[in-house]
């Protein structure tokens, strides 16, 4: 059975004629697919012309401008960008007409400047395969289309031989190397034409379609090499996100120590110094200063405890997510409903990440959402931990603006998870996170 025939299973409720239909007639079990294959080949021609023209022109411009690097940069950007768009159109053509799911192997760009993103495109092999596909689409498309057209047109001409063989100016009709006159010869050719329409032309069409779609899959789909490349890009992105998240956390701890406990300890030292000076001449004033210093010491101790709890809360390690998040929810300034179903218990790294994700999300709710209530749900779904935080606030949250959501994204990316934010203006806001979860 052909590759194109294998793309769509028989629809429910329809008889499976493939088991009873002779192999040679299999292309006719669903004529619509045959016509879709012809449409696929036909659309390959204009797409091939456009792809070849655009890419060859941009290649020529790019190489001619290499002597002036500044001018070559925008030409290179246009080259890879055009090949990217043309590849997306070709994937859509295969998906719409053949049902082929050609998965884009190109990882998302990670560079923070357009020059770095351009360099990523240049060193990514999948991008060069898109250019190769644009160059090969025209010659391969012409060959495949001509093969199909010749098969169908030749078969139709043979089938109509008895009609026009005796009505030509000469006594015979010339078909390739044969001269055929009215009578049995033309009837035999008509029989051959019917066989061609029933067998040869459909199989040629299927073969040409398979050839072109195989090129699309090999150049624009995920190969083992492209998959490895995608995994490397993802690993680099995770490492970068983990480093950024750790740096953000370090700065937060430094800021909290400087603005909180350190200031308390400075005040404590000042109070104790003043008390020592007044100890002999004014014991009552010294006693009052010692009392104030004692209060400062307790406040500093509390802030240090809060900071340590923020780094890794003891209750999380001892009693798990449910108890730790219950304490977070109890401190929230708005009513929060909590639902936790995470049995079996996740790994400590995943638990810690989930705790901080919910903590940061509720902090954002308190600071920016102007919400009256929020909901937190954490469930384990197989090898994934699914976290959802919803509030009824004003919405408009955007993780790309450098807010607390950006820190959430970095933490999630560092663990190889996914974060989705749905926050239309006017609300509500829903933050959904999926983390890989190993018990």
Image (tube, rainbow, N blue to C red):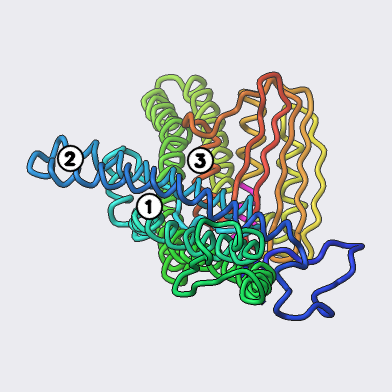
Q: Earlier in the sequence, mark 1 or mark 2?
A: 2
Viewer-nearest of labels 2 and 3? 2
**Is 350 one of the magenta-colored residues?**
yes
**Sequence order check: which comes first, mark 3 or mark 1?**
1
Q: Position of residue 284 (x, y in %)?
A: 52, 21
Secondary element type, mark 1 = helix
Give SS at disc 3. Answer: helix
Q: Which residue is mark 3?
A: 407
Query: Which residue matches tag 1?
Result: 134
Above or below 276: residue 56? below
Q: Which residues are magenta?
A: 348-356
Q: Main secondary structure of the magenta part?
A: helix
Q: Is residue 265 magenta?
A: no
Check whether the beta carbons of the residues at disc 1 and disc 2 lie within 8 A of each other. Answer: no
Query: Picture quarter containing residue 94?
Result: bottom right
Q: What residue would you read off at disc 2? A: 72
Residue 32 in the image: x percent, y percent? 73, 56
Q: Dividing the image into 4 quarters, which one contains the C terminus? A: bottom right
Camera-side residue of 394 and 125: 125
Residue 16 position, x and y percent, is: 85, 72
User: Answer yes or no: do the residues labelled 2 and 3 have beta carbons within 8 Å?
Assistant: no
Which one is in front, 331 or 223?
223
Q: Residue 12 has which mark?
A: none
Q: Residues within 10 Å of mark 3 (few under 14, many from 20)?
A: many
Image point 51% across, 40% down: which residue? Answer: 407
């Amino acid at each position: 059975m052909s590759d194109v025939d294998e793309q769509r299973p028989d629809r429910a409720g329809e008889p499976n004629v493939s088991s009873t239909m002779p192999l040679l007639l299999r292309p006719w079990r669903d004529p619509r697919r045959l016509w879709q294959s012809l449409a696929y080949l036909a659309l390959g021609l204009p797409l091939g012309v456009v792809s070849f023209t655009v890419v060859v022109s941009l290649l020529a411009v790019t190489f001619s401008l290499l002597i002036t690097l500044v001018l070559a940069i925008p030409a290179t950007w246009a080259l890879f960008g055009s090949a990217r768009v043309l590849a997306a159109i070709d994937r859509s053509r295969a998906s719409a007409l053949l049902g082929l799911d050609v998965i884009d192997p190109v990882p998302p760009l990670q560079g923070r400047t357009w020059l770095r993103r351009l360099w990523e495109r240049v060193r990514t092999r999948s991008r060069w395969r898109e250019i190769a596909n644009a160059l090969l689409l025209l010659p391969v498309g012409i060959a495949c289309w001509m093969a199909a057209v010749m098969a169908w047109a030749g078969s139709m001409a043979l089938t109509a031989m008895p009609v026009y063989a005796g009505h030509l100016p000469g006594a015979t009709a010339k078909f390739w190397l044969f001269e055929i006159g009215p009578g049995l010869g033309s009837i035999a050719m008509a029989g051959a034409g019917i066989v061609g329409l029933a067998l040869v032309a459909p199989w040629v069409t299927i073969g040409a379609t398979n050839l072109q779609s195989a090129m699309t899959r090999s150049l624009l789909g995920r190969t083992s090499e492209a998959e490895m490349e995608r995994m490397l890009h993802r690993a680099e992105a995770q490492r970068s996100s983990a480093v950024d998240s750790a740096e953000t956390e370090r700065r937060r701890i430094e800021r909290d120590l400087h603005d909180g406990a350190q200031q308390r300890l400075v005040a404590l030292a000042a109070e104790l110094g003043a008390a020592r000076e007044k100890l002999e001449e004014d014991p009552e004033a010294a006693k009052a200063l010692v009392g104030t210093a004692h209060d400062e010491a307790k406040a500093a101790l509390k802030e240090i405890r809060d900071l340590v709890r923020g780094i890794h809360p003891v209750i999380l390690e001892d009693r798990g997510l449910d108890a730790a998040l219950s304490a977070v929810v109890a401190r929230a300034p708005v009513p929060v409903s909590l639902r936790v179903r995470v049995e079996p218990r996740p790994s400590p790294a995943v638990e810690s990440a989930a705790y901080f994700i919910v903590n940061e999300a509720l902090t954002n709710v308190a600071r920016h959402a102007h919400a009256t209530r929020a909901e937190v749900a954490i469930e384990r779904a197989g090898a994934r931990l699914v976290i959802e935080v919803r509030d009824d606030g004003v919405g408009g949250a955007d993780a790309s603006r450098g807010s607390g959501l950006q820190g959430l994204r970095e933490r999630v990316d560092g663990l190889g998870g996914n974060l989705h934010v749905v926050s239309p203006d006017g609300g509500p806001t829903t933050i959904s996170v999926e983390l890989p979860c190993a018990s």
